[in-house]
Structures are given as C-alpha cells and as structure tokens.
Amino acid sequence: MVAGEVDPGAPAARHLYGADMLTSIVLPIHNQADHLQQIVTGHLEALASREASIEIVLVTNACADDSPEISRDLARSHSQVQAVDLTEGGWGRAVRKGLQTARGERLCYSNSARTTPEMLSLMLAYSDAYPDLVVKANRRIRDNWLRRAGSLVYNLECRSLFDLPVWDINGTPKVFPRSFDRLMELKRVDDLIDLEFVAICAREEYPIVEVPLLQTQRHGGRSTTNVQSGARMYWGAYQMSRAFSIPPR
C-alpha cells in the first residue's frame, strides 16, 4: 500500500486497542532537563481520557545534565512512566532500548523535543482507527531553508535507493503494532534507524499511512543535526542500501 492510502475494505475500525491493551510511548531524552517534566506531564494529561492504557518509557542517553534524575523522579511519581538510563548516546540506541523495555501491544517512538501532546494524541487516534497499519508523521515544514533543502535531498536519496513509499523518512511519532515483529529487530544505533524502520516496512510489506504535521518548534535544547551529521546520513543511506534487500514490486 502506498503511504497515505487507506483501503476502505481493511479492518479499519476494529479498535484493537481497547482498555485492556497497553500502548507504550518511547521518548529518547538527551540533555533536556529544562523541559522534560513539562513534556511528560503534558502527555499524561492529554492522554488521560483515552480508553486504552498507556505507558511512557523515558530513555536518557549520554546526558550531561539532570535528565536522568528527573526521569527517575517522574517514574516514582507516575505509575505510567518508566525510566531507563544509557551511558552511551545515539538516537537509534535509545529507540531500540525503549522498544525492548516497552510492554505494550502497540508501540510508538518519537522525538521528545518536538512532539506536543496534541501531535501525539492525533497520531494515536489515527492508529486507533487503523490498528493494522504503521502510522507516522510527515513534517511539512522545517526550521530554515538549509534544513528544508537537506531534508529534501536526503528523502529523495532514500526513496530512490530503497524504493520507499513515504516522503519523510525521519518523521515521528511512528506508531505500530507489536505484531509487526520485524520492527522489533532494528539494528542501527544512530540517526539512520528511521531509514532502517521504513525500509523494513517496505521489505515486509507493512502498510504505512503518513499524517501531515506542520509544527516545527522545539520545546528546548539544541538539535544535534548539522552539516557533518547530514553528510554522514547521506553516505550511511548509500552504504545501507548496498546491504539491504528489498524484493521488487
């Protein structure tokens, strides 16, 4: 299925995720002590009225501030929060650890600095309606022209190399059912984990729908993306394509 297309005959409204089904939300955290409590309490308040149970898995990684301590305090204060601390950094490493720790039948991971409670609620609502799909964000706007250009080049490269049906490889939140078990076998420990995620979906024919999100403002902290990291991603995508097998359609 092409991203964004939903088969009207699909089991769309089965509401697989009832009150007895747990949704796990993985939030990698890197030096975000100044806004971490606001993020978590905002998500908990926004999701409190949902029928399905939720847990939030905070994965602090290579933090040089008080993020690990704040995460542990939040876990002690809220039964729905788990806290995991990694001494090594890496977006992919934190995502993988969070998914390994998560207990839910539905799984989600997201960029904690950019995901608002409203965004997360919207993505989970789409997943409620279409429980047998991968639901992911498509961020339509970037902070500045350089990021917009860099993102366009990267996404075009990935679509060409992997024959992918999505327009925003790195867009989060990404929500998927645990039954898509190949997504639990992610290997990357770096920023390329999002490309690996989407490439696995293409290879395994897991259907994807993209939801456009327009907000780009960060809660706080600083982005780790720069010209050097961008160049590594372009080269890394090419290297990954040499080893990754996707059957022809």
Image (cartoon, rainbow, N blue to C red):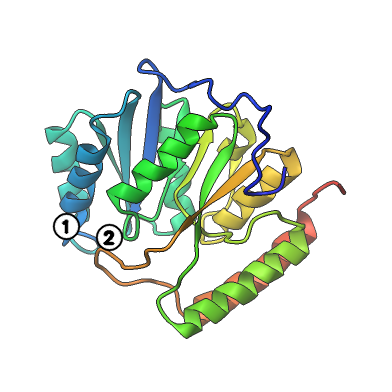
Left or right relative to 197: residue 142: left
Residue contact between numbered discs 2 and 1, judged by CB atoms under 8 Å: yes
Q: Nearer the viewer, residue 36 or 83?
A: 36
**Is 243 rendered above or below residue 207?**
below
Provide residue 175's location: percent of width, then percent of height. Answer: 49, 40
Mark 2–mark 1 distance (CA, rounded to whole Å): 8 Å
Towards the viewer: 34 or 176: 176
Image position of 32 with respect to 57: above or below: below
Residue drawn at x 39%, y 59% as measured from the top left: 89
**Helix, strand or loop at disc 1?**
loop
- For label 2, the SS is loop
Q: Which residue is mark 1?
A: 66
What's the residue type where badge 2 is placed?
Cys
Q: Position of residue 115 (x, y in %)?
A: 34, 54
Q: Quadrant of the N terminus?
A: top right
Image coordinates of residue 213 in percent, x first then y, are: 44, 58
Disc 2 crowd rating (10 Å Cα; few below 14, some 14-19, many 20+) is: some
Answer whether residue 26 is visible to the viewer in this image: no
Looking at the picture, how far across and down is residue 178, in whole percent? 53, 29
- Give the crowd class for mark 1: few <14, some 14-19, many >=20 residues within 10 Å: some
Q: Residue at x 37, y 67 (%)?
A: 216
| Residue to which mark 2 is pinned | 63
Q: Is residue 59 left or right of residue 220?
A: right
In the image, 202 versus 211, the foreground residue is: 211
